[in-house]
Image (cartoon, grey):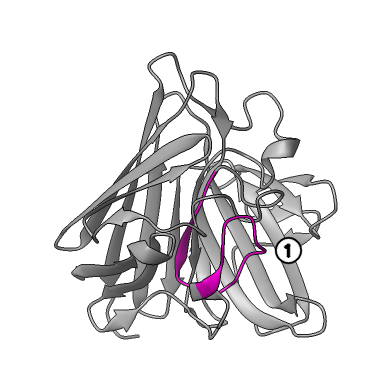
């Protein structure tokens, strides 16, 4: 495996969104035309333009995809921050060759509970595969309103989650209790890992193979390092969400690496 240098572009003025993640000559982030994206105001429904959105303090529920994605951030590509009603989030990104490190800190009142997801929608082929620790606990969400169903990676409720496929009209979400995931697409590999001392970490998946939204479905594949174990903060049980300690701050780190294998 040959390592590939990584580069990232972000848009602080529009929610801190990652608009590009390139390794070698490949773009990893998927995008779509969404004219609402640059005009949204806090509290409005999510405008899906692709890239990587910072979803905090929830993913599903209210506010839709969280409070940070719809607000202007201060700063630049290397360091940026945003103030939301209940918390402040800061992010520092640095790249060294084939490794990208994003350090986050959320400050809020002690006891504050939240979820965070690096909601990355990836530009991958139907033949792409996902690698997560075998047997890791899985919570499968067969549709947005249903209660999750338990499984063990790579299967849950009869659904194999480790392989993508051509569009089949389905859309499922899952949260896997594991700190890292490897995406393999042909010769190319992308690895994402999240670490946060004393906090629950997971990998969320959104496998939309032309099944969402109703009436105008499209294909999108989300692979999302996460703090927490559920999509909706309102449904979080004990241990399912991150919690701000007495110090008033939570720090976590997202590490991304990329590589390229030999030709088959």
List the residue tagged with mark 1: 172
What element does badge 1 sit on? strand
> Around disc 1, counting alpha carbons within 10 Å, would you say few (fewer than 14), some (14 to 19), or many (20 or more)?
some
Q: Position of residue 9 (x, y in %)?
A: 28, 70
* Left-right relation of 92 to 231: left
Quick check: can you spot residue 89? yes
Q: Is residue 33 magenta?
A: no
Can you tell which quarter of the image residue 239 is in?
top right
Quick check: can you spot residue 1? no
Q: Position of residue 50 (x, y in %)?
A: 51, 73
Give the residues drawn in magenta, as a range.
39-56
Q: Residue furthest left?
A: 96
- The N terminus lies in which quarter of the figure? bottom left
Identified at 75% across, 85% down, the residue is: 216
Q: Residue furthest top?
A: 246
* Left-right relation of 31 to 211: left
Q: Identify which residue, 175 or 132, lies in the foreground.
A: 175
Can you tell which quarter of the image residue 248 is in?
top left
Q: Is residue 200 above or below residue 23?
A: above
Identified at 33% across, 43% down, the residue is: 90
Q: Position of residue 43 (x, y in %)?
A: 64, 55
Q: Is residue 127 above or below residue 246?
A: below
* Left-right relation of 97 to 74: left
């Amino acid at each position: 495996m040959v390592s590939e240098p990584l580069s990232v572009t972000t848009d602080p003025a529009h929610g801190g969104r990652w608009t590009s993640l390139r390794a070698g000559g490949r773009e990893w982030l998927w995008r779509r035309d969404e004219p609402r994206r640059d005009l949204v105001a806090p509290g409005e429904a999510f405008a899906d333009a692709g890239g990587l959105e910072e979803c905090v303090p929830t993913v599903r529920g209210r506010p839709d995809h969280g409070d940070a994605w719809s607000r202007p951030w201060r700063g630049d590509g290397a360091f940026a921050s945003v103030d939301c009603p209940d918390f402040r989030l800061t992010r520092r990104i640095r790249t060294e060759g084939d490794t990208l490190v994003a350090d986050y800190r959320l400050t809020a009142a002690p006891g504050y509970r939240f979820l965070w997801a690096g909601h990355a929608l990836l530009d991958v082929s139907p033949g792409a595969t996902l690698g997560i620790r075998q047997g890791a606990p899985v919570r499968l969400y067969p549709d947005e309103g249903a209660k999750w169903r338990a499984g063990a990676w790579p299967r849950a409720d009869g659904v194999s989650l480790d392989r993508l496929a051509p569009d089949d009209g389905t859309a499922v979400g899952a949260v896997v209790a594991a700190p890292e995931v490897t995406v393999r697409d042909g010769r190319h590999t992308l690895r994402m890992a999240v670490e946060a001392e004393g906090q629950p970490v997971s990998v969320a998946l959104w496998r939309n193979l032309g099944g969402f939204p109703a009436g105008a479905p499209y294909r999108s594949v989300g692979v999302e390092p996460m703090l927490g174990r559920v999509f909706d903060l309102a449904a979080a049980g004990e241990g399912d969400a991150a919690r701000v300690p007495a110090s008033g701050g939570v720090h976590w780190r997202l590490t991304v690496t990329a590589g390229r294998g030999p030709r088959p």
